[in-house]
Image: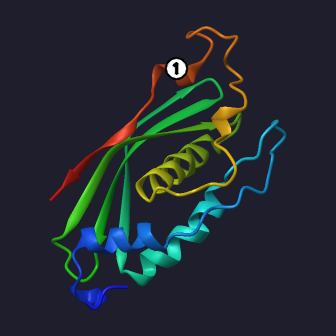
């Protein structure tokens, strides 16, 4: 780590250190699909200690929420706040998460999905041998009307300030 004290770092410097120190996420479960998956907990186990170490608070906000049959889709904006200087913030807008559940757990699954991918993409997290999407797309044979995921896709918009 640089010679500068953590408390004197800017939010950009702190996020860079998290990116530099994050370890690869090990994919351990298959969840009944023909490829390994990366769970929110596996990503969170890598990210959370570094956010704590570098004193970065995250504030996710749901800005859009919709339910289509068993599929819940949320869009979140997430603010990264420098705890040592709360005027230093970075806002990441528009990360989309999907949760498929017949009961009341769809929103939680969608939020976890959105945060997981936000962390993985922001911190360029290595997830192991290959990306889930490289093996199979279960919606290849379906039309756009059959596939609720085709209607919403987004990797977010970044705002520094």
Q: Position of residue 51 (x, y in %)?
A: 43, 74
From the top left corner, tell me how far across and down residue 30 is, in percent: 81, 46
Residue at the (59%, 61%) spot, across then down: 43
- Which residue appears at 60% of the width and 63% of the height? 24
In this orientation, which residue lies closer to the viewer: 56 or 21?
21
Residue 105 coordinates in the image, percent (x, y)? 65, 45
Q: How are the residues colored?
A: rainbow
Image height check: is 31 above or below 154?
Answer: below
Q: Quadrant of the N terminus?
A: bottom left
- Mark 1 lies on a secondary structure that is helix
Label 1 Cα crowd, 10 Å radius (few <14 / some 14-19 / many 20+): few
From the image, tell me which residue sits under label 1.
150
Left/right of residue 142 with respect to residue 161 in the rendered view:
right
- The residue depicted at 15 percent of the width and 71 percent of the height is 87
Q: Position of residue 128 (x, y in %)?
A: 67, 54
Q: Quadrant of the C terminus?
A: bottom left
Q: Is residue 13 above or below residue 153?
A: below
Residue 20 falls in which quadrant of the image? bottom left
């Amino acid at each position: 780590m640089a010679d500068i004290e953590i408390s004197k770092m800017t939010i950009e410097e702190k996020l860079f250190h998290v990116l530099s120190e994050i370890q690869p996420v090990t994919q351990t479960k298959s969840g009944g699909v023909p490829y390994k998956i990366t769970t929110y907990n596996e990503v969170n186990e890598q990210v959370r200690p570094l956010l704590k170490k570098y004193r970065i608070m995250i504030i996710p906000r749901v800005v859009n929420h919709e339910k289509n049959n068993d599929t819940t889709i949320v869009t979140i904006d997430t603010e990264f706040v420098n705890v040592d200087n709360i005027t230093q913030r970075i806002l990441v807008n528009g990360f989309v998460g999907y949760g498929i559940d017949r009961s009341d757990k769809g929103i939680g699954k969608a939020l976890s999905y959105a945060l997981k991918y936000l962390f993985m993409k922001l911190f360029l997290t290595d997830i192991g041998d290959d990306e889930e999407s490289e093996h199979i797309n279960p919606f290849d044979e379906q039309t756009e009307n059959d596939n609720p995921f085709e209607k919403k896709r987004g990797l977010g918009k970044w705002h520094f300030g």
